[in-house]
Image: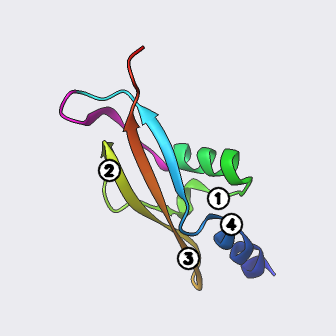
Amino acid sequence: EIKNKFKEIAKLVNKKTFDFFKESKENGDLYGSIKPKEITNMIKEKVKADVSPSQIILKDELNKIGTFKVDINFHAEVKANIFVKIDKIQAK
């Protein structure tokens, strides 16, 4: 039953891109990095799906401008991939 619930969530988020706008230095490095908690909050906001930060698998630190593939591991048999796109906040 839990596995089916995870499958539903995986379907909702799989292959989607979530955009983050961050302040960055001129070379494209961020002043911090995007953490799993921030990603789960964004997923909840955009697609109303509950993902826990511990299910987010980050291969690298998300601390540069660009698009990164992020794995979500819901269950031994249920996985999804999302893309986290980080853009520079445009100075007003």
Residue tagged 1: 51
Q: Going by the picture, which residue comes out furthest to the left? A: 27
Task: Name the residue: 72% across, 80% down.
Answer: 3
The kind of residue on which mark 3 rests is: Lys
Identify residue type, mark 2: Glu
Label 4 vs label 2, nearer the camera: 4
- Mark closer to the observer (4, 3): 4
Badge 2 is on which residue? 61
- Gap between marks 4 and 2, in whole Å? 24 Å
- Give the total number of marks visible in the rendering: 4
Q: Is residue 34 magenta?
A: yes
Give the magenta-colored segment's residue range.
26-36
Q: Check whether the beta carbons of the residues at disc 4 and disc 3 lie within 8 A of each other.
A: no
SS state under label 3? strand
Query: Among all residues in the image, which is located at the extreme right?
Result: 1
N-terminal of the two: label 4 or label 2? 4
Q: Position of residue 83 (x, y in %)?
A: 46, 59
The residue carrying mark 3 is: 79
Measure the C-alpha gap from mark 1 to mark 2: 19 Å
Residue 38 x/y as whole percent: 53, 43
- The kind of residue on which mark 1 rests is Val
Asked if residue 32 is among those painted magenta in the image, a careful observer would answer yes
Three-letter amino acid code at the position of disc 4 = Leu
Q: In whole angstroms, how far apart are the C-alphas of marks 2 and 3?
A: 20 Å
Look at the image and name its color scheme: rainbow
Q: Residues within 10 Å of mark 4 (few under 14, many from 20)?
A: some
User: Could you say which disc has been placed on residue 12 in the image?
Assistant: 4
Q: What is the x, y in percent for residue 16?
A: 55, 61
Few, some or many C-alpha atoms within 10 Å of disc 2 (few <14, some 14-19, many ≥20)? few
Q: Residue at x 34, y 62 (%)?
A: 59
Q: Earlier along the polypeptide chain: callout 1 or callout 4?
A: 4
